[in-house]
Image (spheres, helix red, strand yellow):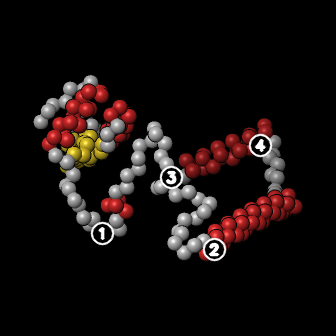
Amino acid sequence: MFRLLGFLIGSAVSIGAILLFLGVPEFHLSNPQLDKGRFDEALEKLREKKIDVAIVARESAEQLSAAFEEMAESPPGSTELPTQPDPLTSPVAADEPPITIDPAEFAPPGTIAPVEQEIHWHAFWNPFRSKIAADGFVSQLEKVTGLDYRVVKVKAGVYEVAFAYDDDGERQARLSQISAATGLELPAL
């Protein structure tokens, strides 16, 4: 009881001392006219953006309808849009590698694409403790050798770097290519 009374008296004295030294604070209640002006400005900006989006959508629809009209006017055997070159048939620059498309990547989920030849993966380096370290190693190897690598999670905290091969001859050739490009001594298994 005395503790509670002492706490209340001490709190009242400290609040009184603060008010005496600093003065009574002035509370600025919000100005309704100022708030209404800011609200109106925000609404006007939203209306402008809505108009801009409507203009862009209308222009896109006009371009799309014009493209359909061009396709309808073109001969029946033609399936290309006259304004857009086909990226798959356009000439490739000499320094760019050709684009290869794997149909298995585009198969719907749950379907099994027919596999002509089974691809094996060979882990050729000591396991890494983090995926970040393994990814860094893979990115450097890809820059140096130009081969495709994968990071395989064996279990929590164990990540291996592997490359794909079809047969033992290709595996040996890739190991020797990695050794020649990086200077790493890889065991020939």
Residue at (71% x, 66% y) in the render = 59
Q: Earlier in the sequence, mark 1 or mark 2?
A: 2
Position of residue 177 measured from the top left corner of the image (x, y, whole percent): 25, 32
Position of residue 21 measured from the top left corner of the image (x, y, whole percent): 78, 37
As drawn, the label of residue 151 is: none
Q: What is the crowding at mark 1: few (fewer than 14 residues within 10 Å), some, or many (at least 20)?
A: few
Q: As drawn, is 123 to the left or to the right of 144?
A: left
Q: Which residue is mark 3?
A: 90
Q: Which residue is mark 2?
A: 73
**Residue type at mark 1?**
Gly
Residue at (63% x, 74% y) in the render = 73
As drawn, the label of residue 19 is: 4
Residue furthest right as drawn? 33
The nearer-to-camera label among 1 and 2 is 2
- Which of the pair 140/176 is nearer the observer? 176
Q: Earlier in the sequence, mark 4 or mark 1?
A: 4
State if disc 2 and disc 3 touch (CB < 8 Å). Answer: no
Q: CA distance from mark 4 to mark 1?
A: 73 Å
- Which of the pair 114/83 is nearer the observer? 83
